[in-house]
Image (cartoon, grey):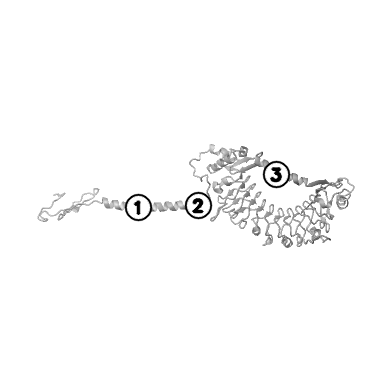
Amino acid sequence: MEIKTKNHVSVVTGSSNMNLILGICLMGIVSLTAAQTRVKCFDNNKGKDQKGIILDCSNMAGKSHPYTIEDWIRYHAFFDDGILANRVLHINLENNNFQEIFTFPYMTSLKKLSFKYNNISSMENKALTNLPALEELDLSYNSLSSHELRQSVFRRYTRPNLPVTNDPVLKILKLGFNDIHSLPPNFFQHLTNLENLEVNNNPLMVIDQNTEISLGYLTNLQVLDLSNTGISDFPTNVFSPLLNVQTLYLNGNQFEKIPKEIRNMPLAYLNMNANPISNLDSESFVGLDQLQELIISGMPNLTDVGYGTFAPLKKLTTLFMSHNPSLSNIHYDAFVDNSSQHSSLRQLSIKYTNISSIDSRLYPWSMLDLFDAKGNPWTCDCRLSWLASYINETFAEIPETLLYYRCSEPKNLYATLVSQLNEHIDCDDYIHISNNHSHGHVTRLRHFIIVIGLVIGIFVFGTLINMGCREIKKVLKPRIYVPTGFSTGVKYKPADFEENIDTIEVPAKNAMIHGRSPIVINNRD
């Protein structure tokens, strides 16, 4: 047994903790076995059964016995062979080629009855009315039609010295792999204690009005299996009465998008495998905020998982998204939106898809307990450098796993182990996200703050430079000192201009300034 924690896989088989757990489980099994006695059909027991009986009448077809199984159970088992009817807990009648369910004798302790793998197409009226403690009935892999699903098969009559019970206590009903096209409207009227209903692999095709009415009685239902029934959509509000369903199987149907009608259920588990869904987006799982396990594998048409697809799933711990041959893109913000970020996910499987690269920002990878991306056609460039480091660390103790991570592109690295990528390429100059893998709105907010800070800094710095330049200009501005009462008639001209005598002002020769002759510069005749 392997238990992977954080980035490492710890093999704990043989450890003290595992031994303790195994010991407790073994004690429970031994205790349970000790409280039960397995009796084979037609064996002479002669009253030796002092504990609960598991009556095994499976695989009896074609064998020679003085009585049929039906007659033996009805008339002989509890008399001739001494089996105590009030001690029988479980009867296994699988694989006997039965064509009809017969009426059982009165058995107060029978809790589990299986008719699986027969050829049953009909049921006697009152066939199960003498089984007041029956909790689990398996009728799967038979030939039952909608017509045979009748109240009279289950509804019991009041018997003397017994408390009146309105409804049977049946909790688990398995009707998978039959020929049921619709559920009769009143079939579940007296089965309101039902918690687990399996109608998988029946040709329902649609949820018609009768089926909708029938399901409406199951207000205590917790598990509903409608897989492989050919359904492509649901009537509006069909599941409104089913406010306790936590497990829903819709795999193998014809849904092109996640049906909105399931949002009323407090689902913890959803299986949408093998539906023709082409893309998932931020609206796909809205309202499923209690979902913990999501299975979306085996989808031949799924190509894209968009921005914020899994953001509504605040409690998601397990995501299986493998064996999707067309899936080539998972948006790096698939787990976040503009207002929230969550990191509840602990198991992620994206193996055997068409993904060639995966962004390090998709998830804080150190939070995962299980990561599986085997068998993908990886494009080995610097964008995948982080994955090489991650899988080397994650699978350090099970290196054989690394053999399933190989480069598909470029050609010169074809079939190279991804774990060895950093030995073949130089990514020192590659700008990439750091190993803390912060992502989503946190990354964008950080970038925004940095940009704003740079803009403000440049503005302030520019202002200070401008002010400083002005002050320097004032200090360094050249000035000509002219004594009081003295004036010069000199004008300067740029050196790169040709001389022009007309531009030089020369005082008149006879002019007197304050009684003195002026100083004349560049005086030319």
Which residue matches tag 1? 464
Q: Residues within 10 Å of mark 3 (few under 14, many from 20)?
A: few
Neighbor class of circle 2 (other Cα within 10 Å; few <14, some 14-19, many 20+) is few
Near-viewer residue (322 or 319): 319
Q: Please tell me whether mark 1 or mark 3 is closer to you in this view.
A: 3
Question: Residue 102 vs residue 476: left or right?
Answer: right
Q: Residue under circle 2?
A: 444
Mark 1 / mark 3, whichever is N-terminal: 3
State the image coordinates of residue 465 (x, y, percent, origin top left).
34, 51
To which residue does mark 3 refer? 24
- For image coordinates 77% across by 45% down, the residue present is 33
In primary-sequence order, the first of circles 2 and 1 is: 2
Distance CA(mark 1)–CA(mark 3): 76 Å
Instruction: Assign a secondary structure to mark 3.
Output: helix
Q: Residue at the spot x=12%, y=52% of the render?
A: 518
Using residue 222 as the reference point, say whether residue 43 is left or right of it. Answer: right
Q: Amino acid at mark 1?
A: Leu
Q: Amino acid at mark 3?
A: Ile
**Distance CA(mark 2)–CA(mark 1):** 30 Å
Confirm whether residue 404 shows in the render: no
Of the two numbered discs 2 and 3 on the same chain, state the one appearing first in sequence: 3
- Label 2 to label 3: alpha-carbon separation: 51 Å
Q: Is residue 23 above or below residue 460?
A: above
The answer to whether marks 2 and 1 mark residues whose Cβ atoms lie closer than 8 Å is no
- The quarter holding residue 374 reads top right
